[in-house]
Amino acid sequence: MRPPELAFVAARFLAVAALLAGMAAAAPFPAALTLERALPHKGVPAEHLRERDRARHAGRGLLGAAPAVSGVVDFPVEGSANPYMVGLYFTRVKLGNPAKEYFVQIDTGSDILWVACSPCAGCPTSSGLNIQLEFFNPDSSSTSSRIPCSDDRCTAALQTGEAVCQNSDSSSTPCGYTFTYGDGSGTSGYYVSDTMYFDTVMGNEQTANSSASVVFGCSNKQTGDLMKSDRAVDGIFGFGQHQLSVISQLYSLGVSPKTFSHCLKGSDNGGGILVLGEIVEPGLVFTPLVPQQPHYNLNLESIAVSGQKLPIDSSLFATSNTQGTIVDSGTTLVYLVDGAYDPFVNAIAAAVSPSVQSVVNKGSQCFVTSSSVDSSFPTATLIFEGGVVMNVKPENYLLQQGSSDNNVLWCIGWQRSQGITILGDLVLKDKIFVYDLANMRMGWTDYDCSLSVNVTSSSGKNQYVNTGQFDVNGSPRYRSGLVPTGIAVALVHMLIFGVLGSR
């Protein structure tokens, strides 16, 4: 971990310890890219996580007409939810000929798959995640070709701000990009086309090796935190709706359906499931996606705590250019629009068990208890269009900030937002989420993400597979490959995702 971050977290722990010690003296306490991008939810200061989170913006085109699909693309995943390890979900992709494997962060809030290329200025050569970093070299792949500015795919990317060309009239000018992230880091490079290899599940737990030619980014420069080695990966895998996203490209090629699903395991061990296909499980409920939006927007209508609806004006959640509700697994925390924030926090504080002691820590509403959060704190619900409900358990709105003896300090992890409500990993974890782009709807249900799931490649086919617990060789999948690297702060990679000169 970087020294400034270590000092920051150490100082926060000392402050928490002092707070708990003082309270104990004053009054007695009660007795006593396989998916992995896990949420660190203990001991990580909320203000640091908040600084990591930034709202993404990226124009994305809707997907085209429906071709036939051939199976469910199953991505291996790795990572950990342990707060003493880097909180990061990432997967492995194989690219080029001969094929090489690259570790890429899974990001449902951006569109483009990009990997570090050779040569690369500022790219780390080692990783604290105990993974071997690779550099893609298009000149060493027999199936690779650079995308020129004259290519129709580059023209489409230019229109949505995800490409930049110095001279679009030239047939030889490379189609480039520059992406800037919320923490000030960035990457730039050019687009290439090459072969991607992946596992396609055909049914009866039979997995076939498949491949397709896809367009992805070849980054030759990185800045800011992307230069650091403590949590370095080879790139980022965007799962947005733009036509250059891999999910859109594979759908247009007839390789996978117009649906993908994930299940983020919230425990310290991490884990989860990511498939291009529809997870089919009892209890799934669906609500419409707001059409013609660059993000995964939903119509949130109201919030309830302990079954009682809060006095919140529903117009605060209406979708517009400046407000709305976004589901984004690339955001660590939850950001609640200003007018709804105080009613929510006040309702939680009023409903806690009498044994819980309320405190204010650095401006945040916190609580001290020696009991379990499930028995001490209320359950909330988010109510969406059609009366569809999302359960919000205490672990979905609380962050553990420290402990002393048997007493634990919990703080509200939801943050105040000016306009946009963003549902991040804190509330998405331990649930199946289905992004059904064919029918413009999103579904979810509470689920133990360490279990296997049934997946179908098409709503019109009775083809189910059991994924998440097997691979081609029959060995377990979705196991953590990380080793402890010290107390680490979550890397969120909330994309500002701007193209220089195009915004």
Image (tube, rainbow, N blue to C red):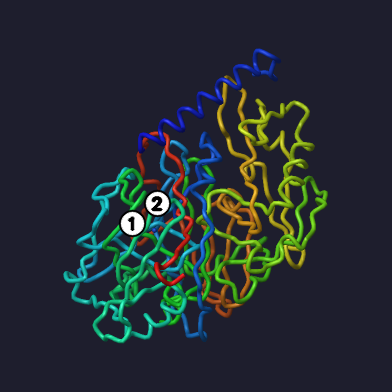
> Left or right of 286: which side holds 67?
left
Q: Name the residue under label 2.
A: 78
Res 383 quadrant in image: bottom right
The Cα–Cα distance between marks 2 and 1, rounded to whole angstroms, is 9 Å
Give the structural element (helix, strand or loop) at label 2.
strand
Q: Which residue is drawn at 29% across and 81% down?
A: 148
| Residue 451 appears in the rendering | no
Res 26 quadrant in image: top right
Q: Which residue is drawn at 35% across and 62% down?
A: 472
Q: Is residue 408 above or below residue 313?
A: above
Q: In which quarter of the image is the N terminus?
A: top left
| Residue 165 appears in the rendering | yes
Q: Comparing marks 2 and 1, which lies closer to the viewer? A: 1
Indicate the position of residue 27 as horizontal and vertical percent values: 71, 15
Q: Which residue is drawn at 40% across and 51% down?
A: 78
Give the structural element (helix, strand or loop) at label 1.
strand
Label located before the other in sequence (2 or 1): 2
Q: How crowded is mark 2: few (under 14 residues within 10 Å), some or many (20 or more)?
A: many
Q: Residue furthest top?
A: 25
The kind of residue on which mark 1 rests is Phe
Asked whether the beta carbons under mark 2 and mark 1 sit within 8 Å of each other, the answer is yes
- Closer to the camera in the image, 358 or 371: 358
Indicate the position of residue 406 as horizontal and vertical percent values: 60, 22
Q: In this view, does 95 lie above or below 33?
A: below
> Left or right of 301: which side holds 108?
left
- Closer to the camera in the image, 415 or 462: 415
Indicate the position of residue 428 as horizontal and vertical percent values: 59, 53
Q: In this view, does 131 lie above or below 474?
A: above
The kind of residue on which mark 2 rests is Glu
Q: Residues within 10 Å of mark 1 (few under 14, many from 20)?
A: many
Q: Name the residue under label 1.
A: 103
